[in-house]
Each structure stands twice: as C-alpha cells, then as structure tokens.
Image: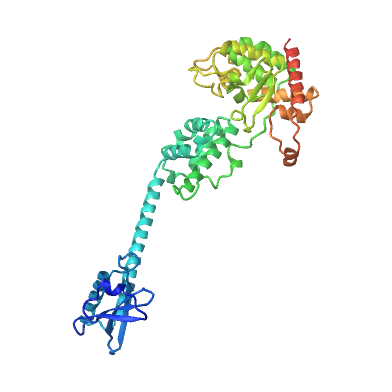
Amino acid sequence: MGSITDRHLTQKEPKDAWLTEDGPRGHGRFMVRLQPNGKHLFYFRYSDQTGKRQFHPLGVYSRTGTTGLTLKQARTQASELSRLYVSGIKNIGEHLDAERAAHEATRQAELAHLEQKAAQKAAEAAALASRQTVSQLFERWMEIDVSHRKDNGAEVRRMFEKDVLPLIGQIFVADVRKGHITQVTDAMAARGVTRMVKVVFSLMRQMFRFAVDRDIIEFDPSSSIRKAKIGGRETERDRVLSEDEIRQLASALPTANLLKTSECAVWIALSTCCRIGELLAARWEHIDLEQSTWLIPAENSKNGKPHQVHMSGFAVSHFQQLQEITGQSPWCYPNRADTGPLCSKTVTKQLSDRQRPLESGTMSNRGSKAQSLILPGGKWTPHDLRRTGATMMTALGVIPEVAERCLNHTEENRVKRTYQRHSYAKECGAAWDKLGAHLQELIN
C-alpha cells in the first residue's frame, strides 16, 4: 500500500493484520502490525545475508507519543535502518546490539574517568585540608563541637590560648607528632599543674580525633601516648580545714584586702557546700531570703540537675550582705559591665594570690597581702571549703547519705539511683542548719 496514516492505525481490526509502506526494493520495509486490542506494533522488515526475512521491532504506536512512538517517529527510525541496510549491513539486530554495547562501554569508561577525577579531587582536598594549622583546626573544632558546651567553650579556649596554641598553633596538622604534644604537656608539668596537664592532654586528643573523623589527618598523633604517663601521677586532693583554721580564717579575711563580695563567697561556699562556679553564676531571682532557699538551676550545676539549697541563718546573713552590694544586678556576682556573671576563676585566683610562699617574692600589680590567707594545713581552695563543710556535717552526726545529697552528688549505685526515690529534703535542711550553727559558734 502507499503511505500509512494515523487513520489506518485508529481502525479496529477483528484479528491481526499487517500494513506495509511501499518503498524502493532492496531498502527494507516499514510495517505495522495491527492487533484487535488496539496495541499496534511498528517493525522494520529486511532480509539477512542468508535471504531469511527478519522483523526488527521499533516500538508501540501512540498517537501523541506519550506512551510509545508516533507514526512520524517510527517512520524516521525505519528510514535510518533502511540506510544502514543499503550500506551493506545485512544483520540489523546484531549491528544495533554491537552499537549499544560500544556505547555502554564508552559510558562506563566516562563514568570511571569521572570517578577517578572525583577521587583525585577529594585526595587533593584532603591534602589541602591537612595543610591547615593547629590554630585553624582548633577554630573549626570549637565551632562544630565545643561551642555547644555549657560555657560555650570559653574555658577550653582559655586553656588552649594559654598553653597549646603559643607552642604548636602554627604547625601544620599533618606535621604534628607526639613530640609536639609532649612539648605542651611537659611545659605545663614544669609549672606543677598536674591535674590541668591531663585535662589539656584529653582536650588535645579530642581535637585530633575530630580531625581524623573529618579526614583532615589519617592518624591521631596522640594515640600512642598513655594518659597515665602525662604530667605524672595525679594525687587525689583531700584538704579539709580544721576548726582552728576556720577561726584563723575569720580573723584573716577582713585584713586580706579582699573584696567584701569575695569574703561573702568564702562563707557561703563553706556553709552551703556549693561549688564556687555555682555561686558565682547565681541570680537573685533564684534566691529567696525570706524562705531561706537557693535554687541552683540545672544549667549551673555540674551534673545537669537542679539543686535546692536550704540556707542556714549563717548563709542567709552573708547573702544579705552580698545583696546590699550587688542587689541592683540580676546576678549575685555580676561582672564589671553587668552583662553577665563573674568569671568562675576570679575568687579562686584572689584566694591563691594571698597564699603565696614568702620565698616566691612579690607579684607586680599586687598588694602586700600575698601571705595573708596562708593557713597551717597548707594551701586551700574554694573547693576545699565544700569538702570541709561536708566533713563537718558528718562530724556533727549527719549521715553520709544526707551529706551526699547536700553536695548534689549523683548516686553511683545504679540500683539505688533507680529505686531509692526519697529526696531527703527535710534531712538536708536540718544538716545545713547544723553546719551553719556550728560555723557561727566557731567564728564567735
């Protein structure tokens, strides 16, 4: 027949029928197989090298081309195959299979080339990343990991800027060896800060493991260093002030040239057994002097749990003195700009500066009270006051379980922690009152 039209393909046939489009002899034939179900199939018919007729499928008819081939698209494909046939290719199927295989091989080669380039680019990026300095790594680690900590990483930054970055900050991360790390810890150990050496070493290890996780370096240079060997053996601190020392302290504090707020901090820390950081971060909104209560919110406590302190009359009197000085601020211990609380190290530093051995000489920009708070039992810190208060409680007959609750320690025994739900609030209140009364008696 002549040209096949869409009208031919929309007619329903009771059984299979074939339509063939006329064309030059020896060029193959464009054909359509009409099916009763309306699913019409396009074919290109040709004779192979043996003279046997072959039917090469082109696709399914679709008037709009959305679910198959339009008549025009199918005719174009048949014309292309006809040209191949005339050019001497007598087995269209094998030829097209070979073309597809060659195309797939080319595509796979291109993909492999792209993957190789991507791997090379990643290696170059890793090499470039490894050329960043320790200071640059520190800033990235701070931003991603450390800035989410309770103090926004302020203490970590202080330690690194003091002891780590001045020594190894400009070294490329990939060039850091364990000798560089021990250079930092040895310099700190020479100052006698045994515990701080271990803290800084642990932080450096965290930073270098962060670098390994980010493919900045391949190996952690601190991995072969044993923490137990860093800074020497750490001795557990057990300093407790005696009753005689507390009497001496009461006499020495007014003449030690301390801020009145720092004097109050000493007596509040001793009578409430709080951590100095919890006190310096306190806000007046959490203190009720009439009810004699002080709430230490979860964000200020070490274990992340809120702690309700019952204040004895002794503790209340010192909070009242403090309120006269800082009561206009939201914070009990505001910084100079009144934009936040005082640094947690401030009181510790003031007390330490007044316990310097005579042979160490005087410090520049310091007063003449460098030995004013030295006590017979040796150097003491605000944390020793916390330990002293708890020890006094047990000496006054308070059971250890209650003293531990006053300290806001987390119960280490998991079973007791799970099943023992008594709060000991009444017993803790009585314990704080006992301690406050005893301190008042000692000072009087």
Residue sitting at x 25%, y 70%: 72
Above-or-below relation of 63 to 334? below
Q: How many marks?
A: 0
- Position of residue 415 measured from the top left corner of the image (x, y, whole percent): 74, 41
Q: Image quadrant of residue 29?
A: bottom left
- Position of residue 268 measured from the top left corner of the image (x, y, whole percent): 66, 18
What sort of colour scheme is used for the picture? rainbow
Q: 413 and 22: which one is in front?
A: 22
Residue sitting at x 54%, y 47%: 223
Q: Quadrant of the C terminus?
A: top right
Extreme residue toward the left, this view: 24
Q: Quadrant of the N terminus?
A: bottom left
Asked if residue 420 shows in the view, the reply is yes
Asked if residue 374 shows in the view, the reply is no
- Position of residue 328 measured from the top left corner of the image (x, y, whole percent): 55, 13
Above-or-below relation of 78 to 336? below
Q: Image quadrant of residue 267?
A: top right
Q: 398 and 183: which one is in front?
A: 398
Image-based side of 129 in relation to 192, left or right: left
Image-based side of 329 in relation to 436, left or right: left
Residue sitting at x 66%, y 27%: 307
- Position of residue 20 measured from the top left corner of the image (x, y, whole percent): 26, 81
Above-or-below relation of 261 to 196? above
Q: 275 and 375: which one is in front?
A: 275
Extreme residue toward the bottom, this view: 50
Image-based side of 172 in relation to 409, left or right: left
